[in-house]
Amino acid sequence: MSDELLKYLLVVLLVIFAFTPVTLNALRRRRENPPPMAANDRKLYRLWRSDPEAYARQYGEMDKQYLAAQEKKKNSDQA
């Protein structure tokens, strides 16, 4: 009985140690709020994560245009 309990305990510990970093990373990413273009493109997301200033220099204006177009679309749908 004790050997089986030890085996189950080891398996549970292995599962906890294996999935804790993955789960914490997923929760951290869920709280992030990337810019619209970075949210839909892996390459831009990586650039935004590594160097937000470089991302803003290269794609900040396009993000602003995208958000303005979305607001315009939203306002025209409501009217």
Image (tube, grey):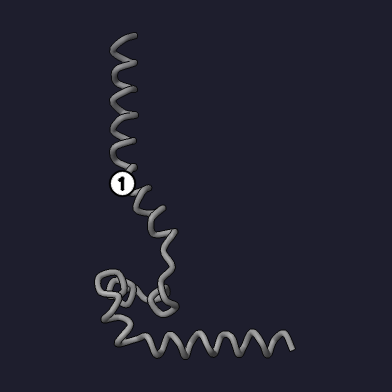
Between 20 and 32, the one nearer to me in the picture: 32
Question: Looking at the image, which residue sits at the far top?
Answer: 1
Q: In this image, 62 relative to 68: left or right?
A: left
Q: In this image, 29 relative to 68: left or right?
A: left
Residue 11 percent location from the top left of the image: 31, 28
Residue 78 percent location from the top left of the image: 72, 85
Q: Image point 45% across, 87% down: which residue?
A: 64
Q: Is residue 60 above or below residue 51?
A: below
Residue 22 percent location from the top left of the image: 33, 49
Q: Quadrant of the C terminus?
A: bottom right
Residue 27 percent location from the top left of the image: 41, 53
Question: Looking at the image, which residue sits at the far right?
Answer: 79
Q: Image point 34% across, 16% down: which residue?
A: 5
Type of amino acid under label 1: Pro
- The quarter of the picture where residue 3 lies is top left
Q: Image point 39% across, 59% down: which residue?
A: 29
Between 68 and 41, the one nearer to me in the picture: 68
Q: Quadrant of the N terminus?
A: top left
Q: Is residue 34 above or below residue 8?
A: below
Label 1 sits on a secondary structure element that is helix
Between 75 and 42, the one nearer to me in the picture: 75
Q: Image point 62% across, 88% down: which residue?
A: 73
Between 15 and 46, the one nearer to me in the picture: 46
Residue on which disc 1 sits: 21
Question: Looking at the image, which residue sits at the far front?
Answer: 53
**Disc 1 packing (10 Å; few <14; some 14–19; many ≥20):** few
Q: Count how many numbered circles sit on residues in the image.
A: 1
